[in-house]
Amino acid sequence: MVDVILGLQWGDEGKGKIVDYFAPRYDIIARFQGGPNAGHTLYVDGKKTVLHQVPSGIFHENKINLIGNGVVLDVITLKKECEAIASFGIDYKKSLFISERTHLILPTHRAIDRASEAAKGKEKIGSTLKGISPAYMDKTGRNGLRVGNLLNDDFAVQYQKLRSKHQQILDNFSYEEDISASEAEFFEALEFLKTLNIVNGEYFINDAIQKGSKILAEGAQGSMLDVDFGTFPYVTSSSTITAGVGSGLGLSPQKIRDVIGITKAYCTRVGSGPFPTELHDDIGELIRKNGNEFGSTTGRPRRCGWIDLVALNFACMINGVTQLVMTKADVLDKLDVLKVGDSYNINGKETKEIPFQMEGIKLEPGYKDFKGWETDITGIKDFKSLPAEMDIYINYINTTLGIPVKYISNGPGTDQLIVV
Ligand code: GDP
Ligand code: IMO
Ligand code: MG
């Protein structure tokens, strides 16, 4: 049995916290896509910790954490992260497993990412510059190196072959960068990787399912950043939706039971691209400040706006969401009026559908206003104690999406989660 937790917006919905909360109910926590562009925050013994490569179940004893074949792996980041995890007394060598089919991010992938973004100028994607797109391009272009290649005698030869292809690309960009230091670090980290549990991920997970293990698939990024269904080209390069679980872990879609979709009580986006309900005023600024909306991976300020039910409805549809988690409700505590985007006006026509492209068209969201609760909810522990205004706000979301909000997160702390 497999359940999925994924983000329904443009990322940073609070997946790290929610996966950490649900992890005790499962045997295996598995990342199925993305790479170190992800930054998943959780609190361990009260200490803020951000995970980029390792699944968010790593701090729970006797759980297996699997990095699936759909992930792209930066070994330098992985090594640093494992060292940080060990400082909490966690024996990751026992609990961390990596699929041999997982593609490697090379130092030159990161350089190409930087060169490509610089060349795009004003049209840049706003990438995290972690080498995500070049690594996935080498996967679909059938050039990439995988974790399993590392154990082959000719790895160094294959590496040099790919590196010189990358050099040609960098030359084409007239991009110069001395990567010798990060190359040395890369090779050192590869030796570290060899000491970890490298497995045939698809047999590993299917055998576990056969034996009755419960799997939690952890998404990275969000549905609106999906390479097919997001706001292309302002997206990431992987399949961030439920469909990505099958190809990213090597399991059949029939094994998937619940799809837990996470949305913030409002909406954020980091990087470039369309964001219909974005706020450019003091309220946006207030949400950024109260929500501490700065990137977990890059530290960039996140763009903030109202919740967008047109986009959420689309995300629920393509993911088959069965229950919702609403995070960061407390961030709206001080607002007297809350707006909910529930339609788009495109070139004078009202619609509830996401268009093929959002830029280059005249798109205005239609809003419904709600009274804010203007109460500090961060200490509330049970659903009945939540303010009536919040009940109305959530009810509207429930009925519009036709999917129940089952959990409300009212603070970053592990214990700040209210069961509805
Ligand atoms: P992820 O990428 O989806 O895991 O999300 P991030 O970790 O990038 O960003 C979410 C941020 O919001 C983190 O700093 C969390 O600690 C924080 N957070 C999560 N849930 C809540 C919440 O309910 N309220 C508040 N105020 N912060 C939250
Ligand atoms: P988590 O898992 C928010 C955004 C980048 C950029 C675009 C492409 O923490 O929610 P990439 O580095 O993939 O080439 O960047 O996607 N992006 C994210 N935004 N949260 C993330 O991950 C993101 N990962 C990528 O800002 O706009
Ligand atoms: Mg994040």
Image (tube, rainbow, N blue to C red):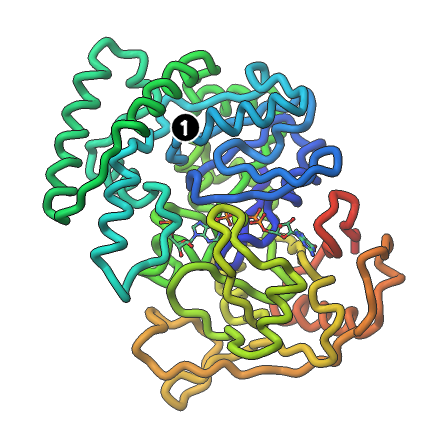
Figure check: 279 above or below 226: below
Is 316 located above or below residue 156 in the figure?
below
In this picture, residue 255 sits left or right of residue 37: right
Pinpoint residue 197: horizontal percent, then vertical percent.
Answer: 48, 15
From the image, which quarter does the N terminus lie in? Answer: top right
- Measured as percent of width and height from the top left, residue 126 is found at 36, 57
Q: State the residue at coordinates (47%, 80%).
A: 344
Quadrant housing residue 396: bottom right
Which residue is depicted at the point 40% across and 83% down?
Answer: 346
Marker count (numbered): 1
Residue 136 visible here? yes
Q: Is residue 219 left or right of residue 235?
A: right
Q: Residue furthest bottom?
A: 348
For this orientation, the residue located farthest to the top is 153
Q: Is residue 147 left or right of residue 92?
A: left
Identify which amino acid the numbered label 1 is placed on: Ile
Q: Is residue 38 above or below residue 310?
A: above
Residue drawn at x 51%, y 77% as measured from the top left: 280
Q: What percent of the width, then of the height, locates residue 39?
A: 52, 44
Could you tell me if residue 212 is visible in this image? no
Along the viewing direction, whichever of 338 and 260 lies nearer the viewer: 338
Residue 370 lies in what quarter of the image?
Answer: bottom right
Quarter where residue 321 is shown? bottom right
| Element type where label 1 sits in the image | helix
In the image as oriented, which residue stretches furthest toward the right? 385
Q: Position of residue 22 (x, y in %)?
A: 69, 39
Q: On the rendered image, what quadrant is the C terminus found in?
A: bottom right
What residue sits right under mark 1 in the picture? 76
Sort mark 1 into few (<14), some (14-19) or many (20+) by Cα contacts within 10 Å: many
Would the CB of label 1 be found within 8 Å of ligand 2?
A: no
Q: Looking at this view, is 24 or 353 the one in front?
A: 24
Decide which of 254, 335 is in the foreground and name it: 335
